[in-house]
Image (cartoon, coloured by chain):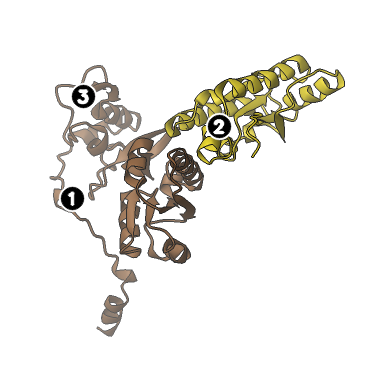
Chain colours: A yellow, B brown
Amino acid sequence: MDNHYEPKVVAFCCHYCAYSAADLAGSMRLEYAPNVRIVRIMCTGKVDTLHLLKAFEDGADTVYVAGCEEGSCHFQEGNLHAKMKVIQAKMLLKEVGLEPERLEMYNISASNSVLFARAADEMTELARKLGPNPLKKARGEVK
Amino acid sequence: MIVGERKPFEQIWESVKDLKSLLVLGCGTCVAVCQAGGEKEVGLLASELRMKSQLGGKNIKIGEATIERQCDREFFDKIKEQAVEFDAILSMACGAGVQYCSEILEPMRSIPALDTRFIGVTEVEGNWAERCRACGNCVLADYGGICPMTICAKSLVNGPCGGSKNGKCEAGQDKDCAWVLIYNRLKKQNRLADLNKVMTVKDYSKQTHPGRYINEVYLKPKMEEKSAQ
C-alpha cells in the first residue's frame, strides 16, 4: 500500500455561483489544489446533512459547500439552508469524534474565481494539517 | 402529533456499543414530521453510528429501515425478514412504537433512540409545543379552544391561581398564563359570560393507566351479537 497521504477534498458547488467561479478559474488559468473533487448541484439548498456525513463516511478528508453570496441565491435562500445543514453536520461530526473543522461553508460569487481557488487551497491545506480522516486510519486505509 | 426528541448520541452509543449488528428502524408518521425519527433521521443516526463504531475499531453491522407507523401491527410485516438478521432494533419511534416493536418482534431486543415528549403542534419549523395531555375528557369547548389542563402549569380548570402576573405564569416567565389566554379568547368570541357557568366536576377516572378505547363498530363478534338481537 502506498503510504503517501494525498488529501481527498469534496466540494459541493452551486451551479450558478461557485461552479461558474470554478469555470472562470479554469479560463483564467488560475492554479489551485488538484485534490478537490467537485460535485455540481443546482443549488446548495439541495445539499442535505446526510450527503455531508456520507462524504466523510466514504473517506473525504475535508468537505466544503460553496454557494452564492448571502442574499444572492438563485433560489432565494438555498445557501442559507445549506449554512444550517453545515452547522448541523458539524455538530454530528463532533458527536461522532471527528473534527468539525473538516467541514466548511463558503460563499463564492460567479465572478470570484480567485476566492474559489483560495477555498480549494485552504481546504486542501487544512486536510494536510489535520491529517487523514481518522475513519480511514481506523479502517487501515492509510497509516 | 406525538413529538419526540432524539436522545443524546452518547446515550444511544452506550446502549448499542456492545452489539454486533443493529437495525435502525424509523417511524414515518409523527416523529418524522417533528424531524426526530423519520427516514432522514434514520440515515443520519445510522451514518453516525457506523462512523463511531469504525473509529472505535469495531465494525457493528448497521441496517436502516423505516416503516409507515410503528404503532400499527401490519406495517411490521415489511421488515420482519430483514429484522431477524440483526441482534437488536434501535427504534426511532415514540414510546408506543418502541413497545409495539418489542412485542411484535419478540424476543428481539428493542432499544429506544428517542425520548417521547408530548402531543403537540409545530409553532414554527424546529419549534414544537405541547397542546394536549390526553386527559380523556375534553373541555376545550368551554374554554375557547385553549386547554387549561395542558397550558396551565397546575392544570387548573376553575380559573387562575395567584401566581398569574402580566399574563405570565409563576412557573416561568416564558410560559403564558392559560387563564389569561382563555379570558382573552372568550372576550374575542363575546362569550365572557360563559365563565360564570358552573362547570361539572371533571372526570379524572379516564386518566387511569393503561388507557384503552374500544370502538364496538369495529368489533365483529359484538356487532354479530347485536344484529342477532
Q: Residue B90: x, y in percent?
A: 38, 50
- CB within 8 Å, label 3 to label 1: no
Q: Residue B212: x, y in percent?
A: 23, 59
Q: Closer to the observer: label 1 or label 2?
A: 2
**What is the three-letter code of the residue carrying label 1?**
Gln
**What is the three-letter code of the residue carrying label 2?**
Asn
- The residue beneath circle 1 is B207
- The residue beneath circle 3 is B171
Q: Residue at x 20, y 55 (%)?
A: B210
Q: Residue B104: x, y in percent?
A: 34, 64
Q: CA distance from mark 3 to mark 1?
A: 24 Å
Q: CA distance from mark 1 to mark 2?
A: 53 Å
Secondary structure of the residue carrying tag 3 is loop
Q: Residues within 10 Å of mark 1 (few under 14, many from 20)?
A: few
- The residue beneath circle 2 is A133
Q: Is residue A114 above or below residue B14?
A: above
Q: Is residue B211 above or below residue B7?
A: below
Query: Which circle's residue, 3 or 1, is located before the other in the chain?
Result: 3
Which chain does the numbered disc 2 sit on? A
